[in-house]
Amino acid sequence: MKIARKIRFLTMGLLISILAIGGGVAVVASEEEAKGANSDVMIYLDHPILTSGGTVMVLPTEVEKEVWVQQQGLENPAEGDRLLDNIRPIQSADRRLGVIVSATVSVVRFHFPRGGNYKFAFAPLDRSKASDLEGRTKLLRHGEGTDVDPTTGKDVHQPRIITVHVMGSDANEDKSLDADTRTKFVALEHYYTCRKFEQAVACDVASERAP
């Protein structure tokens, strides 16, 4: 099936910066001028991507607030990370979410409330090894794209695609850009092996199933 991707390198209304925080280097993104509740998302990197490097494509996905506030009873590694209370405090109306990524090419999709905002950051899953990630994340692209939904055959627009390169012994930027071009951004669970988290999912692109 033909997959159509249209990447716009600079998406207006998106603020992205790279800054250092305790526990590693964070790539942080947010919607410009958005108000209301926020999703604050920590993407924890485990081996092999933490060791070898790779690519993480992040899909912030806007949902109705009634959906966003629901407690799904799923895994949320950020809830037990007390270090975040000091280095990334949130407001009472916000939600702290977390996912764990290990595959060297991964897609992370998380929810944020309609009319609200989001931030995301990277850290080693083992927080005692913060230095293992410092200076190793680089924003490569942010834009939008269109993929074909395999269940309907219709185009689906993905307004936010943020591609981050994780430097490592087996990774380079060309590989990350190639992964961005080949990866599908709709129906993730149809194509890939995915791990569900509270209001989020992390998928291993290398696990792509045959059509």
Image: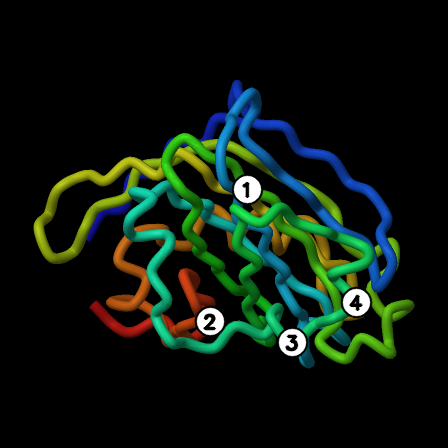
Q: Which mark is residue 80?
A: 3
Instruction: Identify the residue at image location x=36%, y=53%.
Output: 184
**Residue at the disc numbered 4:** 83
Label annotation for residue 118: 1
From the top left corner, tell me how far across and down residue 95 is, in percent. 52, 54
Q: Are marks 1 and 4 in contact (CB under 8 Å)?
A: no
Q: Which of the pair 132/79 is nearer the observer?
A: 79
| In this view, 58 is above or below 208 | above
Q: Residue at x 70, y 72 (%)?
A: 81
The amino acid marked with disc number 4 is: Leu
* For discs 1 and 4, the disc positioned in front in the rendered view: 4
Task: Residue 197: name its quadrant.
Answer: bottom left
Residue sticking out furthest to the front: 92
- CA gap, disc 1 and disc 4: 19 Å
Front: mark 1 or 2: 1
Question: Can you give x and y, in whole percent of width and height, for residue 165 in the image?
Answer: 68, 53
Q: Secondary structure at mark 1?
A: strand
Image position, residue 105 (x, y; %): 55, 65
Q: Are marks 1 and 2 in contact (CB under 8 Å)?
A: no
Residue 207, quarter of the rendered image: bottom left
Instruction: Name the residue type under label 3.
Output: Gly
| Disc 4 residue crowd, few under 14, some 14–19, many 20+, Cα 10 Å | few
